[in-house]
Amino acid sequence: MNDALALPVGTTLDRFIMRKQEDFPYATGELSQLLRDMALAAKIVSREISRVDQDTSGKFGKTNVQGEEQQKLDVIANIRFIRALRNGGEVCAIVSEEDEDIIHTGNQNAKYIVAMDPLDGSSNIDVNIPIGTIFGIYRRLSEGGQDGTLEDCLQKGTQQAAAGYILYGASTMLVYTTGRGVNGFTYEPSLGEFFLSHPDIKIPKNGKQYSCNEANMGHFPLGIQNYIAFCKEQKYSSRYIGSLVADFHRNLLKGGIYFYPGSSKNTAGKLRLLYECNPLAFIAEQAGGQATDGVERILDKQPSALHERCPLVIGSTEMIEKVRKYM
Ligand code: AHM
Ligand code: MG
């Protein structure tokens, strides 16, 4: 059954979450609370992004675990999400793009793990172009009463209890799934609420847009190069923002394909399995699309490290199947 059935457009996120919890008589409400905590942090980060001043603009002056230069907003978003999850009490451990090690929240009896990229699309932060937050939520495997473990964090994408993203664009949107369809909520800042705006999102089976960094074409696997040639023959449009959330969101609503393949320079590509590929793969599949690394379904991949990278091909089913033929 889909989550959105019987709930009208305009339903607040809080009410939506509460009503969905009522569908499960034995639900304890912890995942619901966690989702509300994510939404609270999203509102705060949305505000920080839209107010451009010296506290929020520009470089932070340090590099993160990936060796990438951090922007002030990367750091602010990381702090805000961690704080919301720590105070919310439902998460024992967090994996963040901005931190090398597992972040233990001190909530040792909490049941959930969150893997997140607090602010994705770093190169677009200071130029008023859409950026996003990506998150995947897992149930811990270890017993409560202690910190979450590495094993808790290195679960396959199939084990996600929920996943979502926040898009900070012309409007701020929260899109998430708990494995019963995908629903999108638009933030109304004057009211401080997310409202259901995109119930039961289904990605079109086919599309006419492809998104990749074509400057890297010469380093892509031959199969991908041939697929791009096919897209051009078909007169598809090339649409690449360079913010994964924004590119994915457009393709989700309109039909299309995004790829960041491995290359001769970086065989595993650029994107991170735990907090970029897995959450979006869960959403894509729940919306009727697909996600693969070119060989294997993303959600079936066994992670071996917190910040492991993996090639990503994601979007409309017929387009992914076509790429597979080329690969
Ligand atoms: P980030 O997590 O450092 O922001 O990197 C991820 C981003 C994605 O949002 C985007 O699709 C990709 O990197 C763009 O990379 P490139 O500039 O190589 O095309
Ligand atoms: Mg990222």
Image (cartoon, rainbow, N blue to C red):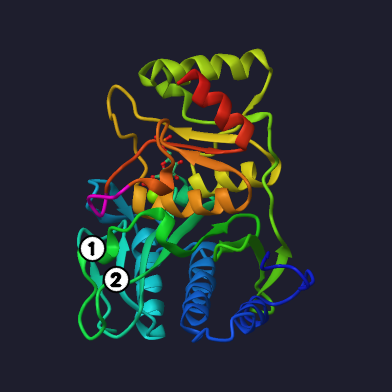
User: Could you give the CA–CA distance between mark 2 and mark 1, rounded to whole angstroms?
Assistant: 8 Å
Q: Where's ligand 1: which quadrant?
A: top left
Tell me the quarter of the image containing the C terminus.
top left
Count of marks, rendered view:
2
Q: What kind of residue is marked 1?
A: Glu
Q: Which residue is mark 2?
A: 141
Q: Residue at x 56, y 29 (%)?
A: 321
Taking depth in this image into account, of 260 and 127 the one nearest to the observer is 260
- Left or right relative to 37: residue 155: left
Res. 165 in view:
yes
Q: Is residue 173 magenta?
A: no
Residue 261 at x, y = what percent? 40, 30
The span shown in magenta is: 302-307
309 over 306 or under it: above or below: above
Residue 148 at x, y = what percent? 24, 73
Q: Which residue is mark 1?
A: 151
- Left or right relative to 235: residue 136: left
Proximity of marks 2 and 1: CB atoms separated by less than 8 Å: yes
Q: Residue at x 79, y 71 (%)?
A: 8
Q: What kind of residue is marked 2?
A: Leu
The crowding category of the residue bearing disc 2, from other C-alpha atoms within 10 Å (few below 14, some 14 to 19, many at least 20), is: some
Q: Magenta region, mostly helix, strand or loop?
A: loop
Res. 55 in view:
no
